[in-house]
Amino acid sequence: MVASSVLALSHLVYAYMMAPAALALFYVGLTRTNARLRLVRLAVTGALAGVITSYFWLPFVLLKAYLSVSPYLQRWKYDSFGAGDILTWLVNGDLMDYGRLLS
């Protein structure tokens, strides 16, 4: 549990790879007699790793509406101008070479 939490906090790519590996280890050697114990261990490890790393992922989940929003940059950098304007500029040639041939 501590190793999985440290891994999730230090390197997210390896933590994502840890999840399928944990499931594979859960299924290897699984019998009816040890299935419940293995499932409880996996659930406890996952829950504790989730609690330990919650300061890392919980703000991302709760504050997702504020991602990529800045009061200091223009709104069009996030929302574009709309499909109608962009397609019109593309057909007119204004999207890439606005006024280039005229100057």
Image (cartoon, helix red, strand yellow):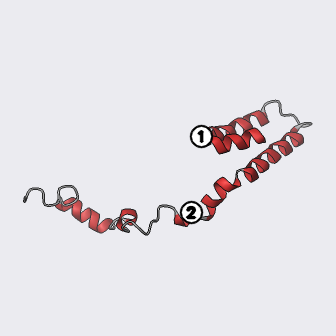
Relative height, residue 5 to residue 79 (above, below): above
Pointer 2 with pointer 1, Cβ within 8 A: no
Q: Residues within 10 Å of mark 2 (few under 14, many from 20)?
A: few
The residue under the point 7% across, 59% down is: 102
Q: Is residue 12 left or right of residue 101?
A: right
* Residue located at (75% from left, 47% from top): 49
| Disc 2 to disc 1, C-alpha distance | 21 Å
Q: Which residue is mark 1?
A: 13
Q: Quadrant of residue 2?
A: top right
Q: Quadrant of the N terminus?
A: top right
Lower sequence index among marks 2 and 1: 1
Q: Amino acid under label 1?
A: Val
| Residue identifier under label 2 | 64
Residue farthest toward the right in the current orientation of the protein? 33
Res 35 → quadrant: top right
- Furthest-front residue in view? 72
Going by the numbered disc 2, the residue's amino acid type is Lys
Query: How far across and how far down the image is residue 25, in percent?
Result: 76, 33
Residue 15 sits in quarter: top right
Give the residue furthest to the left: 102
Identify the residue at horizontal 13%, vertical 60% (top origin).
Answer: 99
- Residue at 56% x, 63% y is 64
